[in-house]
Amino acid sequence: MKSNDNFFEKVYEVAKLIPYGRVTSYGAIAKYLGAARSARMVGWAMNASHNNNEIPAHRVVNRIGLLTGKQHFDGTNLMQQLLENEGIIVIENQIQDFKTIFWDPVIELEL
């Protein structure tokens, strides 16, 4: 279980860098961490982070901009409300202008 904890910490470090008003995907974080096939594990990390207010889990969505993790937030629409508070438009669980506000850590955190 130790290796999962370490992977989760790496996921959280990337998630903390997602700018206000932007979103990324589980797969984009996995790819940045060199684990391109681990998008689901990134999702598990986001689900496990809900007690930590420093991690903006609401800014991590699926690859086409759907709020697939919203059931893991307290309250029916908390994930959507958090995104809308940042000026992101969500209609029927789908982020609008997804490509425009998408934050790709592979590009944005390039060394």
Image: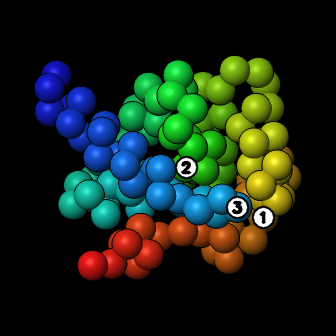
Local packing at callout 1 (Cα closer than 10 Å; few below 14, some 14-19, many 20+) is some
Image location (x, y in percent) of residue 47: 48, 29
* Image vertical order of residue 110 relative to residue 93, above or below: below
Is residue 27 visible from the viewing direction of this image? no
How far apart in space, not on screen, are marks 3 and 1 (Cα)? Answer: 12 Å
Image location (x, y in percent) of residue 68: 61, 40
Q: Earlier in the sequence, mark 3 or mark 2?
A: 3
Q: Residue at x 75, y 42 (%)?
A: 82
SS at badge 1: loop
* Image vertical order of residue 110 relative to residue 24, above or below: below
Amino acid on which the number 3 mark rests in the picture: Gly
Local packing at callout 3 (Cα closer than 10 Å; few below 14, some 14-19, many 20+) is some
Name the quadrant of the C terminus.
Answer: bottom left
* Image vertical order of residue 17 relative to residue 102, above or below: above
Q: Earlier in the sequence, mark 1 or mark 2?
A: 2
Q: Residue at x 39, y 34 (%)?
A: 45
SS at badge 3: loop
Residue beneath disc 2: 60
Residue beneath disc 1: 96
